[in-house]
Amino acid sequence: MLTLWQAEWCPYSARIRESLTELRVDFVARQVAADKVNRDAMRTETGTETIPLLVLDDGTQIDDWKEAIHALHRLYPRPDDADRHREKWFEEAAQRDPNFVLT
């Protein structure tokens, strides 16, 4: 199973999570501390403290968010209804927030 070492506040982690969800790929999200000095578990398991870090099934580690997204799209086919899911996200966002602007 893919593992994403990430933090909710990290915009690059969010981009990878979004791609994983859009591709319907199950993954384990490993939360990390905001301060790198408190990332002992991550350092022990991966040898690094950099987030986001995507670990593929074969153990390959990708610490560049753009490279991680490209790898995901190479490895997993895009579902036929992915565009409809994205449209639904925008519809729901507009309903939740009347100030939401689609750009």
Image (cartoon, helix red, strand yellow):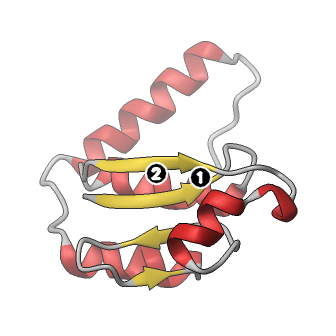
- Identify which residue, 77 or 49, lies in the foreground: 49
- Identify which residue, 69 or 97, lies in the foreground: 69
- Residue at numbered disc 1: 14
Residue 1 lies, in percent from the top left, at: 24, 58
- Residue at numbered disc 2: 18
**Tag 1: amino acid:** Ala
- Would residue 79 be found to the left or right of residue 59 on screen? left
**Tag 2: amino acid:** Glu
- Would residue 28 be found to the left or right of residue 91 on screen? left
Instruction: Tell me the SS state at disc 2.
Output: helix
Q: Quadrant of residue 64?
A: bottom right
| Distance (Cα) linking label 1 and label 2 | 6 Å
Q: Residue at x 64, y 71 (%)?
A: 43
Contact between labelled residues 2 and 1, with CB atoms less than 8 Å apart: yes
Q: Which class describes the residues within 10 Å of circle 2: few (<14), some (14-19), or many (20+)?
A: few
Q: Residue at x 76, y 49 (%)?
A: 33
